[in-house]
Image (cartoon, grey):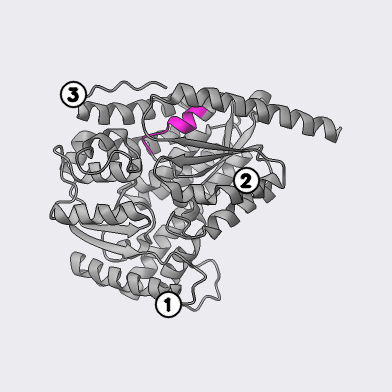
């Protein structure tokens, strides 16, 4: 995949990136009709004409906030996940160049000369790293209405739960003041039902993709899940995902042995966010298959505050406790839930290698690397640390390193198969 950027056309750069990404995704799986809805959802989110007119009521930076509270307050969360190289360029004058690309992209979305998404919004900034704190300061200085949420970094701390509850109660109060709607028990229950319907359908989608291995690419599977954060109609989105799951199950397309036999990798670490899909595309281009992804945006799919029918907690408590338990963002001193989830993937089998993705500036993930190397080392599964940013100039260099990693996986699989005979 190649994307051409011209320094004197920053808005064209923004548009060309998401259009190139969507075009690549569509061309990979154009024969499955129901997939188009999800690509169109992403297109409508990023489309310049749409974003210039949009005035969201509540904006969330990143995915580390329980969205049920926002829905219960009568608003729809407008997620800014920070995956655009185009908006990174717009923040050049605001932050140092070695700031991580996610933070720079988020700031570029909110502080630029092209549109003003935050004009009427309450902007929620979860403090997951030092850059988050700086972003909150810059947004306030620009006159934006900002509420920060401090995430207790040590889940084993006996007071962590109380600190988290205090932060969530303050957030709920700010949301109610901003929207004019109280977070009643009824509203919380309805919001929970909506969000958990979406999560259940996403879990089903992942399972269907496992059953129909090779039917759609790993990058497209990631994009469908990622589109959850870009829809303005979650109920309609759920209906479309239900249809897609049924269509995939009913699909009788014969998958070639070559497609099924590609070495499978677990993509873990810094979240890969649309429209910057250079890593998933590169993994597919060299002949590897993304067997699974594990990051803070994906792990939320497995959070459920109503799965246990005997649960007697009030809905507010159930929502905030479940979110905190499952959150695996970079906020934690030791990211235990990320590690446990990686162990689960290891136990499930079917993973030949691990691509540990680290965006430049997000050193929090590097602190976890040794533990993951040891974990997968017990099963002699290689771990490849891939450090990059949103620029496309390093793709060929990364390709050479990834191809060497693929050769290693292929030889390792051959030895294992020979040993099993």
Residue 308 position by quadrant:
bottom right
> Which element is circle 2 on?
helix
The spot of residue 373 in percent (x, y) is 62, 45
Quarter of the image holding residue 53? top left
| Label drawn at residue 373 | 2
Q: Residues within 10 Å of mark 2 (few under 14, many from 20)?
A: some
Q: In which quadrant of the rendered image does the N terminus lie? A: top left
Res 224 seen here: yes
Q: Nearer the viewer, mark 1 or mark 3?
A: 3
Looking at the image, residue 367 lies above or below residue 19: below
- Which marked residue is nearer to the observer: mark 2 or mark 3? 2
Measured in 3D between alpha carbons, the distance from the residue under mark 2 to the one under mark 1, in whole angstroms, is 40 Å
**Earlier along the polypeptide chain: callout 2 or callout 3?**
3
Position of residue 409 relative to residue 354, above or below, is above
Q: CA distance from mark 2 to mark 3?
A: 43 Å
What residue would you read off at disc 1?
A: 314
Dots 1, 3 in contact, CB < 8 A: no
> Quick one: SS at disc 3?
loop
Cα separation, mark 1 vs mark 3, equals 54 Å
Sequence order check, earlier mark of 1 and 3: 3
Numbered tag placed on residue 8 in the rendering: 3
Q: Which span of residues is magenta-colored?
A: 274-282
């Amino acid at each position: 995949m190649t994307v051409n950027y011209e320094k004197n056309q920053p808005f064209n750069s923004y548009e060309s990136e998401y259009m190139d990404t969507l075009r690549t995704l569509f061309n990979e799986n154009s024969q499955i009709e129901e997939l188009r809805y999800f690509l169109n959802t992403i297109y409508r989110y990023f489309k310049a004409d749409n974003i210039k007119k949009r005035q969201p009521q509540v904006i969330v930076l990143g995915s580390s906030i329980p969205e049920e509270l926002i829905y219960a307050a009568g608003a729809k969360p407008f997620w800014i996940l920070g995956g655009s190289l185009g908006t990174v360029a717009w923040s050049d004058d605001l932050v140092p160049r070695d700031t991580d690309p996610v933070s720079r992209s988020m700031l570029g979305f909110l502080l630029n000369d092209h549109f003003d998404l935050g004009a009427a919004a309450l902007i929620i900034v979860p403090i997951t790293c030092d850059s988050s704190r700086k972003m909150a300061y810059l947004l306030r200085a620009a006159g934006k209405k900002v509420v920060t949420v401090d995430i207790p970094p040590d889940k084993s701390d006996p007071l962590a739960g109380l600190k988290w509850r205090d932060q969530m109660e303050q957030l709920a109060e700010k949301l109610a003041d901003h929207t004019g709607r109280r977070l009643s028990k009824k509203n919380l229950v309805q919001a929970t039902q909506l969000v958990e319907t979406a999560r259940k359908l996403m879990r089903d989608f992942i399972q269907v993709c496992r059953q129909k291995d090779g039917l759609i690419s790993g990058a497209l599977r990631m994009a469908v899940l990622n589109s959850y954060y870009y829809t303005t109609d979650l109920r309609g989105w759920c209906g479309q995902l239900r249809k897609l799951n049924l269509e995939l199950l009913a699909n009788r397309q014969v998958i070639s042995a070559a497609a099924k036999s590609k070495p499978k990798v677990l993509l873990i670490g810094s979240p890969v966010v649309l429209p910057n899909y250079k890593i998933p595309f590169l993994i597919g281009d060299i002949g590897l298959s993304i067997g699974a992804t594990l990051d803070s945006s994906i792990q939320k799919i497995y959070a459920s505050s109503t799965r246990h029918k005997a649960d007697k907690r009030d809905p507010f408590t159930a929502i905030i406790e479940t979110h905190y338990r499952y959150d695996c963002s970079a906020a934690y001193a030791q990211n235990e839930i990320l590690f446990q989830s990686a162990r689960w993937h290891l136990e499930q089998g079917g993973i030949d290698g691990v691509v540990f993705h680290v965006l430049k500036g997000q050193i929090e993930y590097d602190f976890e690397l040794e533990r993951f190397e040891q974990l997968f080392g017990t099963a002699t599964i290689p771990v490849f640390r891939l450090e990059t940013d949103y620029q496309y100039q390093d793709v060929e260099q990364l390709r050479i390193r990834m191809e060497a990693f693929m050769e290693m996986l292929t030889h390792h699989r051959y030895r294992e198969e020979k040993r099993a005979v």
